Image (spheres, rainbow, N blue to C red):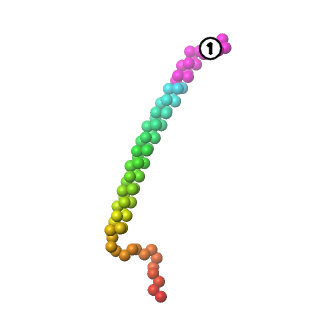
Amino acid sequence: MKGQLSAEMIILVAVILAVVAIVAISLTKTAQNTSSAVENQTQSITDKTQQMVANFSASSEQPILLSPEKTS
């Protein structure tokens, strides 16, 4: 008959859907782990930058010259 699905086709569709679901779950977990790692690195960089700015602001020394002054 033209409109009927065989049992093999139904099983094949179920297996394909299961594989797609497993891949989607795996990608979601990977994305969550990556997001957490990026958040930790961002926090670390922010903390170090704040420390550098605080140390620079608290310093009473003259600023460092990047190019030599002309004494003519």
Of residues 43 and 18, the one nearer the viewer is 43
Of residues 6 and 46, the one nearer the viewer is 46
Q: Amino acid at mark 1?
A: Gln
> Residue, x 52% and y 26% (percent of image)?
17
> Residue, x 47% and y 30% (percent of image)?
22
Q: Main secondary structure of the magenta part?
A: helix
Quarter of the figure with the N terminus: top right
> Residue, x 55% and y 22% (percent of image)?
13
Taking the view exactly as shown, the residue that stands out farthest to the right is: 2
- The residue under label 1 is 4
Q: Is residue 8 magenta?
A: yes
* Residue 53 in the image, given as x and y percentages of width and height: 37, 64
Q: Is residue 66 magenta?
A: no
- Mark 1: few, some, or many residues within 10 Å (few <14, many ≥20)? few
Quarter location, residue 2: top right
> Residue, x 43% and y 40% (percent of image)?
32
* Residue 71 in the image, given as x and y percentages of width and height: 45, 86
Could you say whether the residue bearing mark 1 is in a helix, strand or loop? loop
Of residues 22 and 70, the one nearer the viewer is 70
Q: Give the magenta range.
A: 1-15
* Residue 6 in the image, given as x and y percentages of width and height: 59, 15
